[in-house]
Image: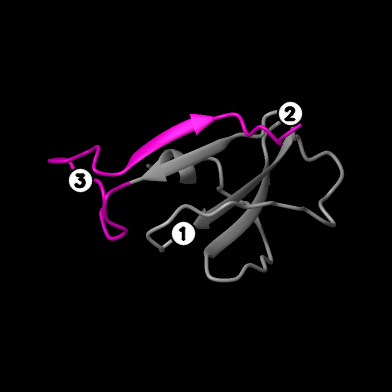
Amino acid sequence: MQTFFRESNGAMIHPVEIMSLAASAITWKDTRNSFLRVKIVDFGPHAVNLTIRTNGLQAGVNTTWSRVTVLTSSNVMNENSFSNPNKVRGWLCRSPGVR
């Protein structure tokens, strides 16, 4: 899952307020665009519905490329390894509420 970290070099961390979940938010820039990444971890046994609202972002954050990656596993403590690289799977999809 190194793909989550490759773009965040030099990123700006933003404060996140969320109850009962672990979360972080960053913005970063490439040569032409600014992006926002929000990471949320649900440590509970059941799926959680979320609404994400952003306030005070810098002008120019590119929402056109917004996407959702869902990581799933049978146990919250699982991690990928060379011997079992798919223990935690990532699914990339467009978020229906993202514009």
The N terminus lies in quadrant: top left
Badge 1 marks a residue whose secondary structure is loop
Of label 3 and label 1, which has the lower sequence position? 1
Image mark for residue 1: none
Within 10 Å of the Cα at label 2, are there few (<14), some (14-19), or many (20+) other Cα atoms? few
Q: Rounded to the nearest whole Å, what is the CA distance between mark 3 and mark 2?
A: 33 Å
- Based on the displayed image, in which of its 4 quarters is residue 7 positioned? top right
| SS under mark 2 | loop
In the visual, does 57 lie left or right of 44?
right
Residue 26 coordinates in the image, percent (x, y): 64, 53
Relative to 17, residue 49 above or below: above
The residues tagged by marks 2 and 1 sit, at their Cα atoms, a distance apart of: 26 Å
In terms of sequence position, does the residue under pointer 3 or pointer 2 come before the other?
Answer: 2
Give the image quarter of residue 82. Answer: top left
Residue 78 in the magenta stretch? The answer is yes
Q: In this view, does 24 lie to the left or right of 42?
A: right
The segment highlighted magenta reads 73-99
* Image side of residue 23 versus residue 1, left or right: right
Residue annotated with mark 1: 42
Residue flagged by tag 3: what amino acid is it? Answer: Ser
Residue 64: give its label. 2
Residue at 60%, 71% in the rendered image = 19
Q: Residue at the location (76% across, 35% down)?
A: 62
Q: What residue did someone put label 3 on?
A: 81
Q: Identity of the amino acid at label 2?
A: Thr
User: Callout 3: helix, strand or loop?
Assistant: loop
Give the residue at the far left of this rendering: 83
- The amino acid sitting under disc 1 is Asp
The spot of residue 92 in percent (x, y) is: 49, 31
- The residue lying toward the viewer, choosing from 98 and 9, is 98
Q: Is residue 10 magenta?
A: no
- The secondary structure that most of the magenta stretch takes on is loop
